[in-house]
Image (cartoon, helix red, strand yellow):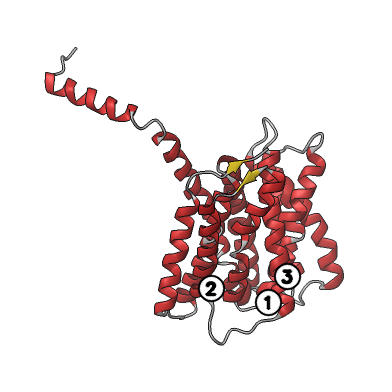
Amino acid sequence: MSISSPQAQADTAAHETRSAHRPGQAPRNRALAAAALAAIGPATWGTTYVTTTELLPPDRPLLAAALRALPAGLILLALTRRLPSGDWWWKAGVLGLLNFGAFFPLLFFGAYHLPGGVASTVSAVMPLVVAGFGIGVLKVRPTRRTLLAGLVGVVGVGLLVLRGSASVDPVGIAAMLIATTLMALAVVLSKRWGRPEGVSLLALTGWQLTAGGIVLAPIALSFEGLPGHLTGANLAGYAYLGIIGTAIAYALWFRGIERLPASSVSFLGLTNPVVATLAGLLLLGQTLTLWQVGGLLLVVASVLVGQGRPARRHP
């Protein structure tokens, strides 16, 4: 048994005193760790545009959505061996429709009909839409800090991804706005409903993916059908989107929704256009202008500010 020196005892006491004056440090660190993991989801989604345009068959957004959702959902169901019970049958169906059954085809439609920059700029309004839904559903009033960070994020994404020659398809814009609204509503409802006791995140993700995929599959086959043949690149693209960009990414995203305020999670979605821009830079030979660098800094600042104090509840 060793005896500490007076200096060591003094250092220990000083450390304990400092820790006592920082009671919120541990929860803050846990929140930052949860945010870092949740950000992997939208960061992965940032590669959807380049994957769609470079690897997938053209003009089949419904098929791309169905093959992204249903196989991943069935794999997760097989791994977890857990089905919904009680009111989670309809809750999983609602969330599956919002997150996948409706969101995915609208997302792919926007990817096919809009430049990636325009699509990303439209989707950047999600923190503001989540703040709006949060007032009615979660009874949470957004702070001015949240609203300001949301506006800064939209401006930053616009500077980051828009090009002067970017074409604007009104139908594509409408599709992305609806998709963003549906995903924002899904975030808020997921926060309100939580996760059923004893159910893993992978099981919950599998329920939603399967529900959305069941809706999508017959529609995709009826309106688009299967391509005459699938190349190795096509199969690689579908596998990447299904396993990495969907099953794993959404499990991490839902984990973030569970552990963080809805507004904080929504700001993490802004990592999507950042990664999309970097993917274009690295894989498509694009370059960054000074304005884009400024936009990148604004987006990063928006995400960091968005992880601040939670919004205020109101009766």
Camera-side mark, 2 or 3: 2
The part of the image, by quadrant, that contains residue 85 is top right
Side of 76 where 149 appears, left or right: left
Q: Which numbered marker is on residue 112?
A: 1
* Callout 3 amino acid: Ala
Q: Earlier in the sequence, mark 2 or mark 3?
A: 2
Residue 197's spot in the image, x, y percent? 68, 30
Identity of the residue drawn at 71% across and 45% down: 137
* Callout 2 amino acid: Gly
Query: SS at mark 1?
Result: helix
Identity of the residue drawn at 70% across and 60% down: 181
Q: CA distance from mark 1 to mark 3?
A: 11 Å
Side of 9 where 122 appears, left or right: right
Camera-side mark, 1 or 2: 2
Report the residue marked by disc 3. Answer: 175
Q: Nearer the viewer, residue 252 or 147?
A: 147
Report the residue marked by disc 2. Answer: 158
Q: Earlier in the sequence, mark 1 or mark 2?
A: 1
The part of the image, by quadrant, that contains residue 106 is bottom right
Q: Nearer the viewer, residue 275 or 265?
A: 265
User: Neighbour class for label 1 at 10 Å: few (<14), some, many (≥20)?
Assistant: some
